[in-house]
Amino acid sequence: MTKESKDFDEIYSKTYHNVLKFIVCKCQNIDDVNDLVQETYIELYKKLLKDEEVENEVSYLIGIAKNKLKKHYRFKSLFRTVSINDEDKEIQIPSDVDIEKIVLKNMDIDTVWNLLKRKNINIQRIFYLYYSLDLTIKEIAKYLNLSESYVKNSLYRTLKELQNVLRKDDKNV
């Protein structure tokens, strides 16, 4: 393993959670999150290949992520093209809540994701942060600059809505 790879792995493991959280909170489309995270870490790796030091890794990577977000959405606004690629969508739902059992039994992940994508971006962010990053409602409210009651209501209202949709689908089968 090269020094750059070792340094990269170390920085990646220390910073990934914070960088992902930042990108999810600032991203306009949840589908773009993985690409933006990847682009951010590619820039880090390029810097390490040049044998340059990185002082404050989290701040440095957040700065890269900000630039990637600006560039990504500036480019997207110039070229309003629609891309349909559903292969990389994944939602991880814990099994301790009844609705998750119903979701996993009766619908595939793509269908649940498509239902969530119809919601506003804040609800998508709330679900991503809650289920993928295991953040608490209080943490999500802080990062998204929303009230805790809004986060909690959005989460549970959407879960209830998913449950109702799933019950309807279950009866139609």
Image (cartoon, rainbow, N blue to C red):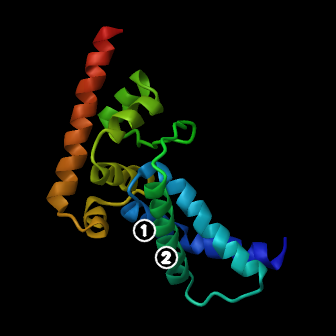
In this view, 128 is above or below 63: above
Residue drawn at (55%, 62%) of the image: 37
User: Which disc, if any, is residue 124?
Assistant: none
Residue 119 percent coordinates (x, y) = 28, 42
User: Which disc, if any, is residue 22?
Assistant: 1
- Which quadrant of the structure image shows residue 24? bottom left
How far apart are the two marked residues, 1 and 2, measured between alpha carbons? Answer: 7 Å
From the viewer's perspective, tell me whether residue 78 is left or right of residue 152. Answer: right
Location of mark 2 (residue): 62
Element marked by disc 1: helix
Residue drawn at (45%, 42%) of the image: 91
Question: Where, quadrant-wise, is the C terminus in this rendering?
Answer: top left
Few, some or many residues within 10 Å of mark 1 (<14, 14–19, 20+)? some
**Observer-nearest of 39 and 171:** 39
Instruction: Please identify the residue farthest to the right as the structure is shown.
Output: 1
In this view, 122 is above or below 57: above
Instruction: Please identify the residue farthest to the left as the structure is shown.
Output: 149
Residue drawn at (30%, 62%) of the image: 140
Residue 103 percent coordinates (x, y) = 37, 29
Residue 109 percent coordinates (x, y) = 46, 33
In this view, 25 is above or below 34: below
In this view, 101 is above or below 25: above
Q: Are marks 1 and 2 in contact (CB under 8 Å)?
A: yes
Instruction: Please identify the residue farthest to the front as the structure is shown.
Output: 78
Q: Amino acid at mark 2?
A: Ile
From the viewer's perspective, tell me whether residue 135 is left or right of residue 158. Answer: right
Between disc 1 and disc 2, whose residue precedes?
1
**Observer-nearest of 66 and 162:** 66
